Amino acid sequence: MWNKLQQIWYTPDLRRKLLIVIGLLVVFRIVAHIPLPGVDLTALRNYLAGNQILGLLNLFSGGTLENFSVVLLGVGPYITASIILQLLTMIVPKLEEISKEGESGQQRINLYTRWLTVPLAFLQSYGMIRLLGQSGNNILTSLTLGRMLTIMLTVTAGTMFLVWVGELISEQKVGNGISLLIFAGIIAGLPTALRTAYVNYTPSDLSTYLLFAAAAVATVVGVVFVSEGQRNIPVTYARQVRGNRLFGGASSHLPLRVNMAGVIPIIFAISLILFPPMIAQFFVSAKAGWMVNLATSTIRLFQNQIFYGAAYFSLVVAFTYFYTAVIFHPQKIAENLQKQGGFIPGTRPGPETERYLGRTMNRLNLVGSLFLGMIAILPLLVQGLMGTQSLAIGGTSLLIVVAVAIETAKQIEAQLTMHQYDAV
């Protein structure tokens, strides 16, 4: 490990990229502590402590909600916009054609995602202000129309600033920028969580702490196992005669990962599962009785751990399939193999190869998605046994942290390997 760190440090280009990424993450954490005026932070933190849904949202924003900072919403609106654009890409033929145009098409989709992020951030900031304003805890003081518009514009600009920072990080090719921002936000809350656990510890809680530690270890092992697992599809290249020379005839393999979607299904699932109870919060104080009952029932339903766990599990499985379908294209792989003179032994090139790859990927997705879903709800199962809510949040956080760390380490390893080849 130390040898690897030394190699990274003594590679000037890679060292520069890592220092840029670290600097951008520091900027993110500094901005996350710049509060907006007119907010009673003590009342806000007490309110978040008693609201599980908003507490989870505060966790994934890196404490920006708790501080009511200029980046109050984090990258949540951008993630929501990404989900909407990817769904539309599968439905709208025009967007599907754009997505198939290679790098230029992907850049246009990214541009549309950024455009959609602006109105979403503006609406979500309004919703958050209304939600905190009607909480009855005097969180927002002297809230005039002008101050509300100022806060909404500032929060929207803060979200777009984080999107820009995330893109700058992605350009360094040592990790996904948006994922690393979420990673940094979760890690930033780790010292506080450990201190709280230490202060609240009593000898009677020993079994709870041990069970949580076992769940954490199982989550780490499971995420590493799923992330590193792959199936190697054998590929043989036909021999070609060019003049008096013989080319090809080599054998290789096509690696298909068990969890090709990475951490994205978890982030998507969390973003979506927070949406219904968040919307329901706005109608708790409505004038219509049926609306109040509906909002209260929705909030109560999502606070039910059995329903929450089942919905979380189902969304993780569904998004794993969905995102894999977005990034994995058996038809293109089959066409490329056929153009290069490659084929899978026992399978005809062309459509039959495409169907074979599709079936194989679906089987891998079944195993990977179910395993990932079980790991996701494992802390919830422990929570049900021990009766503590911190395990659910801690388990989800650990799931994202481990997956993002693995993804980032792989990209750094690839960069290091590339520089070693260049040196030779």
Image (cartoon, helix red, strand yellow):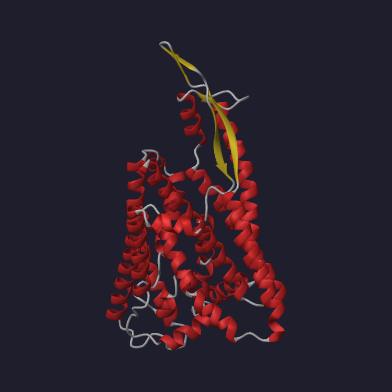
Across and down, in percent, residue 70 comes to 34, 74
Classify 92 as above or below 344. Answer: below
At x 43%, y 46%, the residue is 417
Q: Is residue 147 visible?
A: yes
Q: Is residue 313 above or below residue 194?
A: above
Percent across and percent down for residue 83 are 45, 55
| Occupied quadrant, residue 236 | top right
Residue 221: percent from left, percent from top: 63, 59
Query: In the shown orientation, is residue 101 left or right of residue 286?
Result: left
> In percent of the image, x 30 and y 68: which residue is there?
157
233 or 65, nearer to the observer: 233
Position of residue 404 relative to residue 48, above or below, is above
Quarter of the image with the C terminus is: top left
The picture places residue 361, in percent across and down from the top left corner, at: 59, 40
Can residue 311 be seen here?
no
**Left or right of 306 on screen, residue 342:** left
For the residue pair 196 and 55, the one nearer the viewer reads as: 196
In the image, what residue occupies the spot 55% across and 34% down?
253
**Extreme-top residue of the structure:** 244
Residue 371 versus residue 235 in the image, above or below: below
Give the number of marks: 0
Task: Compare residues 169 and 38 and report the one nearer the observer.
Answer: 169
Instruction: Classify residue 21 as left or right of residue 370.
Output: left
